[in-house]
Amino acid sequence: MLQGDCTELMPQIKDVNFKFDMIFADPPYFLSNGGISVQSGKVVCVDKGDWDKGGSPEYMKEFNHKWLSCCRDLLKDNGTIWISGTYHNIFSVATELTELGFRILNCVTWAKSNPPPNISCRFFTYSTEFVLWARKSPKKPHYFNYELMRAINEGKQMTDVWSLPAIAPWEKSCGKHPTQKPLSLLTRIILASTKDNAWILDPFSGSSTTGIAANLTNRRFLGIEQEQEFIDISIKRREELEDNKIRGNYRKKLNDLQVAKKFISQEADLSFVEDEEIDLPF
């Protein structure tokens, strides 16, 4: 973990000529404008913090261009980047990706199986977020584990609509980030687009869900976060994984990891047994 502004720290990483296989970014959505929602049956304000307050279209364009430029410098030529968002920010992000020379591969729709209710009853209930997937070079091939994604989808091609739940209580055992993503989402993204031991960067790391998912899948991780509160949660979450029972329970709760485990065993022409009896990558 590095503490600070990602647009200031990423150029320093560039100076040492280090490149990443994949980047996941959960940038500000710019939706903290005094709105309300429902959590655990209670009406709550959706404001996340000053860092998420909306700005002008010009400000959003400049902000997205700046951090995406830094990310581009740190990606390997065959690397890919995933960026989450809603309609508040995702169109601006897509425009900057195109202007910077990325090739957008997919716009994945994350359909939440347990969205909060619409308390105003004046429009459709918000139940989705989007995740853009793009590669650095339009012509340089990227890595995609098509066969594993097909296995996870019961032998059928996986589409760009993923039905996954929002974060569960067990994912908040060390505290909660206001925009925390579920491990199921990050695990799938990592398994789909990286190989074992790949290096993954998250420039808006928050409580480090990306890092926990990377650890569970035997990848390496660097996170950047400004707020000490969320760095403290990240450290606690990582230390929690030192308990083999907790680590094992996490893996059992993540369906994609269970399928991947069987998939790798079959590729190696081995019978499916417990972790301690077989040398699997995770």
Image (tube, helix red, strand yellow):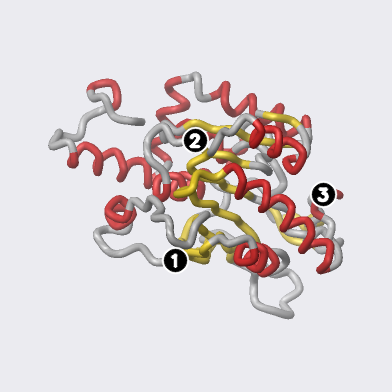
The amino acid pointed to by label 3 is Trp
The amino acid pointed to by label 1 is Asp
Visible residue check, residue 209: yes
Using the image, tell me which numbered label, if any, was put on residue 51.
3
Report the Cα–Cα distance between label 3 and label 1.
29 Å
At 68% from the left and 36% from the top, the residue drawn is 224
Tell us which disc is closer to us: 1 or 2.
2
Tell us which disc is closer to us: 3 or 2.
2
- Quadrant assignment for the C terminus: top left
At 72% from the left and 57% from the top, the residue drawn is 64
Asked whether, in this view, residue 209 is left or right of residue 35, the answer is: left
Q: Quadrant of residue 171?
A: top right
The amino acid pointed to by label 2 is Trp
Say whether disc 1 or disc 2 marks the residue closer to the N-terminus. Answer: 1
Q: Quadrant of residue 260?
A: top left
Measuring from the top left, give residue 122's x and y in whole percent: 74, 80
Viewer-closest of 52 and 222 = 222
Say whether disc 3 or disc 1 marks the residue closer to the N-terminus. Answer: 3
At 73% from the left and 69% from the top, the residue drawn is 119
- Quadrant assignment for the N terminus: top right
Say whether disc 3 or disc 2 marks the residue closer to the N-terminus. Answer: 3
Position of residue 101 relative to residue 235, above or below, is below
Using the image, tell me which numbered label, if any, was put on residue 160.
1
Position of residue 158 relative to residue 151, above or below, is below
Report the Cα–Cα distance between label 1 and label 2.
24 Å
Which residue matches tag 2? 199
Q: Do labels 3 and 1 touch, CB within 8 Å? A: no
Asked whether, in this view, residue 230 is left or right of residue 220, the answer is: right
Measuring from the top left, give residue 170's x and y in whole percent: 55, 37
Mark 2 neighbour class, 10 Å CA radius: few under 14, some 14 to 19, many 20 or more: some
